[in-house]
Image: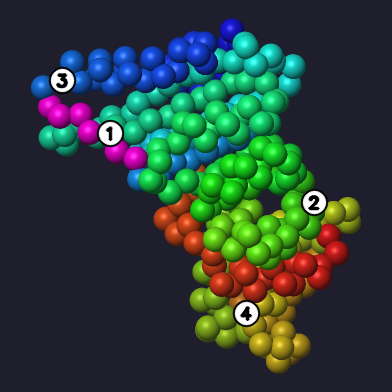
Amino acid sequence: MSHPSLSSTYLGEEFPLTELVKRFREEWARRRDHTDTPVTRVASFNLLVVSQGEDEERLVEVLKGLMESHPARVIWTKMMEGRKWEDSTARLHLECGCDGVQVCSEQVQICCGQQPERVASLLLSLIHEGLPTHLLWWKSGPTEGPLFERISDRSQLVLVEPNDWPSFAQSLPDLWLTCDRQEHAFYPLIWYQLTEARQKIAYAYGEGDIELALPKQTNSSTAEADLLTIWLETLLPHSARTSSRARIVSTAECTEPTLNSAMHKQPLLLQSPLDAVRAALNRPTRDPVFKKMIELIKERDF
């Protein structure tokens, strides 16, 4: 067995994947046998998480934080290069809070090799039937192939933390506009990390003229700059964009998106990935504004 990283030790001991169902039963039985209060399994949705080991500390912060706010069955699959399927392992954690009744939600981590069809079949077999299913695709490569296609087809909401923003941006129109995907919502996670920034821009615009100053890029585009620019172009009338009412400038003088208005100058900071995932899960629907943005993204050369 591999040694778990310190960041994910909250999930408990590692054991062979073949023991997962047995461990589930034993853990629930243990919980019920060692308390006089009722133990209630609560899951308002399934959350499938796919990663390949990149930026794991941030991902663990998200998953640990969700236990406090969003009871669910979370199934995190960490695909590891070179691992054989028969060496796959799992870990299990039940988080229980007590307010007269013990309310418990579940998190499972599966460490396995990169066998897309097998991973997809395993994940789909573990979800609670009858509950909504969502997907967090965490730095796991292109949004294509048998694994992504099978599990995203079962997911109402698909959040992507991309390895490469320009490549993912180019794939977004197909994800949103293909006829058989009209019931699914696909978003880059950073769209929700920009929620407060967008609120500040909207408020300042309601009070007077604004200028959105973006860092000057010499190599490739950034998700923050691209999404804020396209969002403004989608919402503002042409007259506002061609006058001084709302300006978008690129300057080497700032290192992060900055809002300049009559009220003040303020950096537009990103919200944490945890807050972003929480916001997305609270409204797992197709945003009509983002859908309009897709048309501009389709025309843009990233």
Magenta residues, as a range? Answer: 37-43
3D distance between C-alphas at marks 2 and 1 = 40 Å
The quarter holding residue 42 reads top left
Q: Is residue 243 above or below residue 90?
A: below
Earlier residue among tags 3 and 2:
3
Q: Amino acid at mark 4?
A: Leu
The residue at which mark 4 appears reads as 235
Foreground mark, 2 or 1, reads: 1
The residue at which mark 2 appears reads as 167
Q: Amino acid at mark 1?
A: Arg
The residue at which mark 1 appears reads as 41
Residue 61 visible within the image: no
Q: Are marks 4 and 3 in contact (CB under 8 Å)?
A: no
Q: Which residue is at the front of the view, 141 or 258?
A: 141
Classed neighbour count for the residue bearing mark 4: other residues with Cα under 10 Å, few (<14), some (14–19), many (≥20): some
- Indicate whether residue 38 is drawn in magenta: yes
Q: Amino acid at mark 2?
A: Ser
Horizontally, is 131 left or right of 259 in the view?
left
The residue at which mark 3 appears reads as 35
Classed neighbour count for the residue bearing mark 1: other residues with Cα under 10 Å, few (<14), some (14–19), many (≥20): some
